[in-house]
Amino acid sequence: MRPARFGALALCGAFPAFAANAAAETFLVRRGAVPPPAVQEWYSSLDALLTGVDALALRSAAAAAAPSGADAAYAASRLSGLLEHVSRVVGPSAAAGVKEVSEKLAAAGRTDGPLGPADAALLADAASRSALRLAGTLRERALEATGPRAAPNALLSEDGADWELPFLAVDGVDGPRATPALAALAAAVRAGGAPEQAAASRRRVWTRSAGVEVFLDLWAPPGSPSVRVRAEAPGPGSLEQSAFYFLARALFECGFSVSAESGIVRAAFGAERAADPEERAERFASAWGAASASRRLAPLLKAHLSETLTRRQGEERVEALARAFAAEGSLPVVGSGPDALDKGMAAWMTRAGARQALRSRMDADLSALGLPLFPAGDPVGQRTIDLRFNGPVAAAMARGEARKAGGRLLRDPRWDPLDRLAAAVPVPGPMRRRLGPALARSLPAGVAAGRRVERGQWRVGPDAWLIVLFARGDDGLPSRMAAEVASSALARRSVSPADALARLEEFGLVAGSEAEGPGALPFDAVAGTPLAGGAPVEGPLTFDAARAAEGKLIFATPFLSSRDMQSAAKARAVVPTAGGPQAQAFAARAGIPGVDVPRGSWDEGTGLMLELPLWKAGPGGGRVASERRRALLREGDKVRVDGRRGTLEILP
């Protein structure tokens, strides 16, 4: 394990060079012939299908409170237009089912005015067969489909690296800079070596080797996994089964939900909580690294498990190995002999005290900088150090909040979160109503002219962050914005609104449809995504669906599962952290307020963690949020939910 670094991080770079950063690695892409027509058609159908069902889900959910004949007609037309794509990607039988629902919706669409109860349920009932639920089912089945195989038509490499990856370039890999998908693919190669097959489009990446598939969807909507893994058991032998168990445990330790049945492991990340694009790409690379490690693990396990006497002892050793992998991002091996893993794990275990001391030092630095502490449940290793310490510290240095002095990390008291606001320019009119996802992933930066200003920050290079200030207008929508790309070395350059918005769209942070303005937001409220309106409600929180059914509590949950909906319908309000269209439609049809809080995180076994601003006086009678505090909401804490504005407030 290398010591923690401050700042310069060896992560993904630019293509061919998106910023004047001499330290950035450069991706090189060589293109060959276009894919065969059948391959192009399949991938084009997949993109069209996913785009179409996502648009259908959003429109159906938005209409759930008061669906009309026009909404049913739209859904019917959308489904009808997807029939060819469904047939090609999912299969003819699925297309027949889509056609049946489309015809029923077309009949309902001939109605003028509001839909009746049965037709309204056909459009947007999250718990029965409806256009909304069909959209989710088609998305899941499309992502499980295996497209036609084709020879690679592109070559990805990295300046200064010793690898090259032939891959199938579906679309969107040309351009003046690296796409997030190519950056994620390169990170996967560094983590686990080159896959036997790889394909990339502008939004998605597929990697496959014998018995293993890992898929990344950078534009996955809330409530849908952004990373998926499917792996088959490599063989019936005990060592092979132990290696397969390692994969399941390593994915679990890396934050995936994991299931195993009939010799197949399925894992998913991102459905239970919102994740930033950088986090999605990191989990994709880690999943590929774990899958690759598991395939070469069986011979190494022979010596490592030779002294175990019971099955449970063997499992415990594999679980410890998986935890070490999740910490380091690689297998702990020493040398190349048959006992390399045994020696590596022994050495790793002997450094437990040093890792604990390092955790304490990192927590002291993070606390001094006002950043979240190293999670107590995370093991300490190079991967988690980069995730929990190096990354956040470098990001704080890039925005000017932290600096190094005399080898120490210090919080810079001169930092002004609004220092770029004077350079803000109007947000292009059509985009004002589509920036909800970016705003929901931003933090309060201050208050100017009586209106909130939000700050979003996203990694766009090895040591480069896109930092955007959004100044809200009277309607609560962003009226002005200022953007820059900055590094931990304090190199900064302004970015035009068009370029910044293009970046945000690449990350899936621009909505496909327009939203109404929420109005002026309370300064101390957590701003999320409105799910369903109605009068604001106050009450105690519960994380238990059964208690929510009592009708007096506000139900907070990572996401709304179908088994929770009947109970949650009796709650005073719902607050998911990865709600999406299903939660929006559910709350609207149940007639209860709802707010999706994507910046919320679940503190293991204790409650919902939120970041809140600490305000101080700013220039011109305004306020600045130059510091933050973390608030842990527990069972029974009182909150206020405003579904129309999309805000959550903590009450005394």
Image (spheres, rainbow, N blue to C red):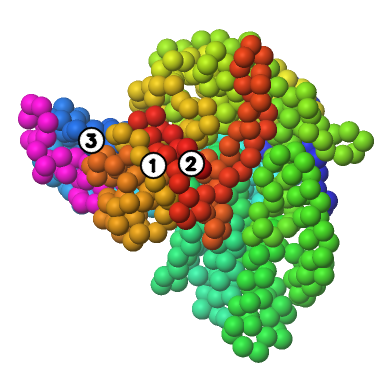
Q: Which residue is mark 1?
A: 538
Neighbourhood count class around disc 1 (C-alpha, 10 Å): few under 14, some 14–19, many 20 upward = many
Q: Residue 178 in the image: x percent, y percent?
A: 61, 30
Quarter assignment of residue 542: bottom left
Left or right, 594 with reference to 287: left
Left or right of 93 in this view: 534: right
Q: Gap in Å between the C-alphas at discs 2 and 3?
A: 28 Å
| Highlighted range, magenta | 107-136
The reply to whether residue 46 is in sight is: no
State yes or no: residue 176 in magenta.
no
Q: Which residue is mark 3?
A: 65
In the shown orientation, is residue 29 left or right of residue 219? right
The mark nearer the N terminus, 3 or 1, is 3
Callout 3 secondary element: loop
Q: Amino acid at mark 2?
A: Leu
| Dots 1, 2 in contact, CB < 8 A | yes
Q: Give me the disc on residue 651.
A: 2
Spatial separation of the CA atoms under disc 3 and disc 1: 21 Å
Ranked by sequence position, the earlier of labels 1 and 2 is 1
- Residue 612 in sight in this render: yes
**Marked residue nearer the N-terminal end (2 or 3):** 3
Q: Is residue 342 above or below residue 20?
A: below
Q: What amino acid type should be assigned to the residue bearing mark 3?
A: Ala
- Decide if residue 7 is on the left or right side of residue 277: right
Where disc 1 sits, the SS reads strand
Q: Nearer the viewer, mark 3 or mark 1?
A: 1
Q: Is residue 113 magenta?
A: yes
> Dot 2: what SS?
loop
Dot 2 alpha-carbon crowd within 10 angstroms: few under 14, some 14 to 19, many 20 or more: few
Image quarter (top left, top right, bottom left or bottom right) of the N terminus: bottom right
Q: Residue at x 26, y 47 (%)?
A: 126
Report the residue at 13% width, 45% height from top: 100
